[in-house]
Image (cartoon, grey):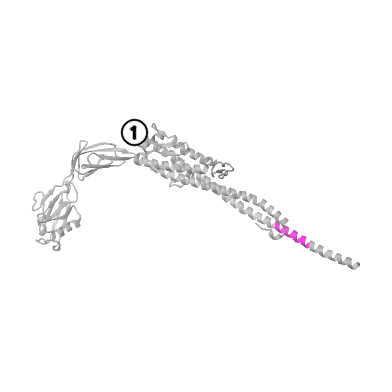
Amino acid sequence: MTTVSSLGSSQVSSQIAQVQSRLQAPITAMQTQVTSDKATISAWGTISGAMSTLAKSLAGIKSAATINSRSAASTGTSVATATASNTAAPGTYSLTGVTLAKTQEIYSSLLGSGAASLTGGAGSLNFTLKNGKTEKVSVGSGSLTLNGVAAAINKVAGGVQASVVGTAAGARLVLQSSATGSSQAFSVAGTGALAQFSYSSATAGTETLAQTASDAKLSLNGVPVTSKTNTLSSAVSGLSISLVGSGAATLTVSSSPTSLSTAVSSVATSLNAALSAIAKETKYVPPSSAGTSSASAAKSGPLLGNFTATNLSSQLLNTVSGAAASGVSANAIGLTVSSAGAVSFNSTSFSSAYTKNPTAVQTLISQIYKALDSITTGAIGGSGSAASSKSTGNIGSQTSALQATITNIDSQITQTTKQNNAQLQLLVQEYTSAINASNSASISQAYLSIFTSTSSTSSG
């Protein structure tokens, strides 16, 4: 605003200040409105953030039936253990007559040492597996030791692996099928210095059969089962069985609500955060008693009395307090609402309800998910891939409208300020002209007074 202190007249300055105050009043009112609208936008931003967190936590209970986990226990962990996926059917599985799948293993006669040279010249080992696969390993004259032969076989990394076992009496070349199962049985034909390692089930030669390749065998609930490995991944849908020894064991698959309980707890936590955010922005704090050291004026949140905010809180609370399905209520699964409007979750109650009726609990959780998902989408909008499926929600609509109002008011403030400055400048100019004219008249009057006085003296 233009200052007028230079005019030198306290009366004129006072009058200009009064006009300036009158012109500033609507601007101050508009600035107050902008401050209030910005506080409201900030409050909505806080609530929107809490609602976004709630929306993310809902992903954990979107598919309650598939979130449900299973646990598997064994009465004979030295015979078999198991892990269950969430698709495994609860039940008991009896394993009897368990024998493990084994590899074929042969070993050579004692030789001097692993580093001692083999006689007979360069040669090769030709392996033939029972499944029809053949492999050839050639060993040059520079590698004709047990260690060299073992290294050459392992370099191929095929159906047979080799090692050298040293003893005080000498060393042996040990050949073992790379995998278990009867189809992994092998024969070997050697040439040159390696002819001594030839072996077949019909002609063992100097090799000794230490272990025969065999499939795992057992009865599963009375049904015979064979497997080339000691891991049964398809015998029972959703159940992976590991055989670790011979004998018998009973496996029990049961429902485990741990994963779903954790997901529901997360939703309860984020739901409470959203309710607290709304309560903070809509609360009213009455004034304290006057005359005390802690006396204070009444305070209110930016969204006090805002229907959209209070209705959002009511919807969230009603979703929990009124939830029920298949004879199971939210309270029965550990979700309760206090008189103060806070949601709590008891995992023990949840586990108990789930044990009694897992299907009903899953149905109730799905119901709560759908209701809360609808509320959060209405509040903060969706995020579909198609542009038509995206929305800003009620909160976005309100903040956009407020932002548009702020922009409009800012424009009015700018325009009004320009007009006020121009009006004050014109008023200052008018007062200045008037003062100048008054000063000029005073000077003229002074001169006239002097002239009049001189004339009178001369006449006398």
Instruction: Name, please, the residue furthest toward the bottom.
Output: 458
Residue 428: say if magenta: yes
Q: Nearer the viewer, residue 367 or 262?
A: 262
SS under mark 1:
helix
Q: Quadrant of the N terminus?
A: bottom right
Spot occupied by residue 314 in the image (x, y as percentages of width and height): 49, 38
Residue 320: say if magenta: no
Spot occupied by residue 423 in the image (x, y as percentages of width and height): 68, 55
| Total numbered badges shown on the rendered structure | 1
Q: Main secondary structure of the magenta part?
A: helix
Q: Is residue 159 above or below residue 451?
A: above
**Side of 16 relative to 353 (left or right):** right
Q: Nearer the viewer, residue 231 or 57?
A: 57
Q: Residue at x 60, y 52 (%)?
A: 411
One can see residue 313 in this view: yes
Residue at the spot of label 1: 356
**Side of 137 relative to 446 (left or right):** left
Q: Which corner quadrant of the image does residue 453 belong to?
A: bottom right
Instruction: Name, please, the residue furthest toward the top.
Output: 327
**Side of 354 relative to 93 (left or right):** right
Magenta stretch: give its range: 427-440
Spot occupied by residue 307 in the image (x, y as percentages of width and height): 53, 40
One can see residue 61 in this view: no
Label 1, residues with CA under 10 Å away: few <14, some 14-19, many ≥20:
few
**Side of 438 relative to 342 (left or right):** right
Spot occupied by residue 325 in the image (x, y as percentages of width and height): 40, 33
Q: Amino acid at mark 1?
A: Lys
Q: Quadrant of the C terminus?
A: bottom right
